[in-house]
Image: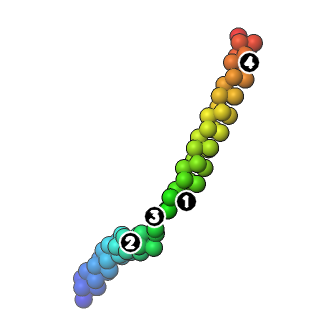
Amino acid sequence: MARINEKSQGASQIEKLTDAPLEFVKEGQQFLAKCKKPDVKEYTKIVRAVGIGFVAVGVIGYAIKLVHIPIRYLIV
């Protein structure tokens, strides 16, 4: 009787391990079904925002580099 109980516990543990990935895939499919592609106006806003972010980070990095070049030569 104890062996049957051990087997059923093992089977339930395996089911728990396989249920999580299946549930994840199911929820992912539901999420993708609700998503929509952006229209042209929304896409251009996103591209513009990302472009401004790239430029801003580049300008900040370049400014920091320009400030540190003279400081480095003063220290050495």
What amino acid type is highlighted by mark number 4? Ile
The answer to whether mark 2 and mark 3 are in CB contact below 8 A is: no
In the image, residue 42 lies at what x, y percent? 55, 59
* Residue drawn at x 24%, y 85% as measured from the top left: 4
Which residue is farthest bottom? 1
What amino acid type is highlighted by mark number 2? Gln
| Helix, strand or loop for disc 3 | loop
* Residue drawn at x 66%, y 33% as measured from the top left: 59
Q: Nearer the viewer, residue 39 or 25?
A: 39
As drawn, is 64 to the left or to the right of 43?
Answer: right
Residue 24 visible in the picture: no
Q: Which mark is residue 42?
A: 1
Of labels 3 and 1, earlier in sequence is: 3
| Helix, strand or loop for disc 4 | helix
| Helix, strand or loop for disc 1 | helix
26 versus 8 height, above or below? above
**Residue that label 2 marks:** 29
What amino acid type is highlighted by mark number 3? Lys
Of labels 2 and 1, earlier in sequence is: 2
The answer to whether mark 3 and mark 1 are in CB contact below 8 A is: no
Q: Nearer the viewer, residue 45 or 54?
A: 45
* Residue drawn at x 46%, y 69% as measured from the top left: 35
Q: Which mark is residue 63?
A: none
Q: Residues within 10 Å of mark 1 (few under 14, many from 20)?
A: few
**Residue that label 4 marks:** 71
72 versus 6 height, above or below? above
Report the mark closest to the observer, 2 or 3.
3
